[in-house]
Amino acid sequence: MSTRSGTIVSAAATLSCPHGGRASATAGQPAAVRLDGLPVHTAADVFAVHGCPHTVDGVPHPCTTVRWSPQPGGVLVDGMPVLLHTSAAQCFGAALVPQGPPSVAAAPRGVSCA
């Protein structure tokens, strides 16, 4: 049996690409489980990155999306794995080139079910 630990990623979390761009959920049905009144994020959510200043040899190559790869066997909400700040994730540019993992800062205090 494996153990997983980490802070649940909710809509209150601050997500950034490795270059300082801001990531936010853009699609997906809000989860029925909430932290401090805000939905938790699951593997079903789609994340977009805005304001990434990353360049390669002076040519802009900003991060545009974040893809998560949560481990199977964790907590499920609406049948989908809940994202933890320790869940594997990768930021990608428009050409789907990996550009590094996002950083997640969250400080949830409570859990409720809708």
Image: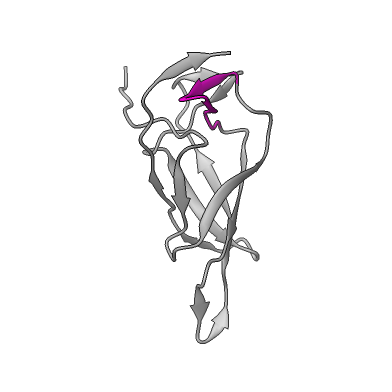
Q: Is residue 49 left or right of residue 72?
A: right
Furthest residue in direction bottom, as rendered: 58
User: Residue 87, image x and y in percent?
Assistant: 42, 38
> Residue at point 68% right, 29% down?
29
> Residue at point 49% right, 27% down?
82
Furthest residue in direction top, as rendered: 113
Q: Nearer the viewer, residue 89 or 9?
A: 9
Residue 15 versus residue 5 in the image, above or below = below
* Quadrant occupied by the N terminus: top left
> Residue at point 49% right, 33% down?
10
Rendering quarter of residue 94: bottom right
**Residue 38 sits inside the magenta stretch:** yes
Q: Is residue 35 left or right of residue 108?
A: right
How many numbered badges does the structure rendering display?
Answer: 0
Q: Nearer the viewer, residue 60 or 15?
A: 15
Segment tinted magenta in the rendering: 32-42
> Residue at point 46% right, 25% down?
36
* Quadrant occupied by the C terminus: top right
**Residue 113 sits inside the magenta stretch:** no
User: Residue 42, image x and y in percent?
Assistant: 55, 31
User: Residue 48, image x and y in percent?
Assistant: 61, 52
Furthest residue in direction front, as rendered: 37
User: Residue 11, image x and y in percent?
Assistant: 52, 36
Residue 90 versus residue 8 in the image, above or below = below
Q: How is the image coloured?
A: one colour
